[in-house]
Image (tube, rainbow, N blue to C red):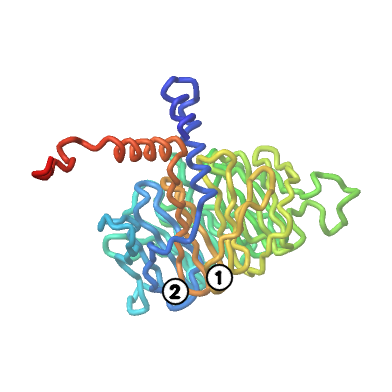
Amino acid sequence: MLGFLTARQAGLDDPLRLRRAESTRRVLGLKLNPDRDVDRVHGNGVNTIDIDAIEGKHMLSGGADGVIVIYDLENFSGKPQYTCKAVCTVGRSSRYVHKFSVETVQWYPYDTGMFISSSFDKTMKVWDTETLKPAEVFEFEGNVYSHHLSPIARKHSLIAVGTQNPKIQLCDLKSGSRIHVLHGHRGEILSVRWSPRYEHILATASADSKVKVWDVRRASGCLFTLDQHNGDKSKASSEAVNTAHNGRVNGLCFTGDGLYLLTTGTDDRMRLWNSATGENTLVNYGKVCNESRKRLQFTVSHGCSPEFVFVPCGSSVAVYALHSGELVTMLRGHYNNVDCCEFHPDYQELYSGGKDCNILAWVPVLRASDVEEETSRENKGAAGQSSVNPAFQDAWSSDED
């Protein structure tokens, strides 16, 4: 670390190199923090969580009990031991609460005054954070598995919605209406995700084993369908042509720069794709346990070198190196299956929620003192013992002297 600081001070290193190095060290040091708790409010499993991108101070959670909770992540006490308090709740007593399981929650990307939730009660609700009342309600024909609002869009305010119906619905937040439908899948849409690089690019994952990438400005079909065999027909059976996985595809996640797309499927595989060409990079992550019949929320680190992937795997969270596929560690602490996790890029922290009704905080361990610092402290201590300030020396003398 001292070497990085010296090189940064002398102008020998890129300004971001020190930041990446420290972010990487912090991610590699993630541990379950015994000093930080998150209020346990949900009476059933936690399906989804989201941290606001503006201030990074508030977290949303949605549960299988239909309840939505807003947490304050900031530590006002100044003490190392504190609890992230639930500041407000859309509970069972509210007339506006979802009737069934909440599958996805998301903050409005530019302001914490609004958030969006979708549920198995066949609705998606746009909430006013101040009043905790829905400003708009979209109703669908089947269960809503996933929705997503673009984190970078300036020219549109479209929410992509995946339901039991194989058609992807595009809802306009400004007009409050469904304005477009994307046709192409043959199974229920389990996950949808906008690109963080191009505001009109959308990825969708379905139970038909396919992942499609769309440009919503085009009236024709999708841009391309991801093929796990990269077009090699000799390796694919007739049923596996243009499929991303050999099972239901229930997880999607772009990397922070939008250059790569990660997918997970019930074939216990995770794959990394070039988001521009749709090419399978063939990174081998090994077996990634995935028993979820619904959407699986996983996440990627931001600002590290290399980047890391955090994937729920049974009752643990598996941490993989993004481009090498190496399993770095397993974060164990939940008592039941983990359904969602979210990375906090400002502090390199991870929050995970599971069927045990708990949300756990994984926090970087404190850095140990550098060797040079410890040596200098020891030397100072030794010098202090040998050369005591004369003002504190014993000046007593006997009469015999």
| Residue at x-position 39% and y-position 52% | 52
| Residue at x-position 51% and y-position 51% | 29
Kindly identify the amino acid type of the residue bearing the numbered disc 1: Asn
What is the quadrant of residue 258 in the picture? top right
Q: In the image, residue 317 lies at what x, y percent?
A: 58, 61
Q: Secondary structure at mark 2?
A: loop
Residue of label 1: 143
Q: Earlier in the sequence, mark 2 or mark 1?
A: 2
For residue 201, side relative to residue 173 (left or right): right
Work out how far the residue at label 2 is from the one at label 1, CA to CA, in angstroms: 13 Å
What is the quadrant of residue 89 in the picture? bottom left
Residue of label 2: 66
Is 54 above or below relative to 264?
Answer: above
Kindly identify the amino acid type of the residue bearing the numbered disc 2: Gly
Q: In the image, residue 56 lies at what x, y percent?
A: 37, 50
Quarter of the rendering occupied by the C terminus: top left
Callout 2 crowding tier (Cα within 10 Å): few <14, some 14–19, many ≥20: many
Q: Please say whether residue 401 is visible from this viewpoint.
A: yes
| Residue at x-position 47% and y-position 65% | 118
Residue closest to the eye, 75 or 191: 75
Q: In the image, residue 22 lies at what x, y percent?
A: 48, 40
Residue closest to the eye, 223 or 304: 304
Q: In the image, residue 335 lies at what x, y percent?
A: 54, 74
Number of numbered callouts drawn = 2
Q: Secondary structure at mark 1?
A: loop
Q: Please say whether residue 138 is visible from this viewpoint.
A: no
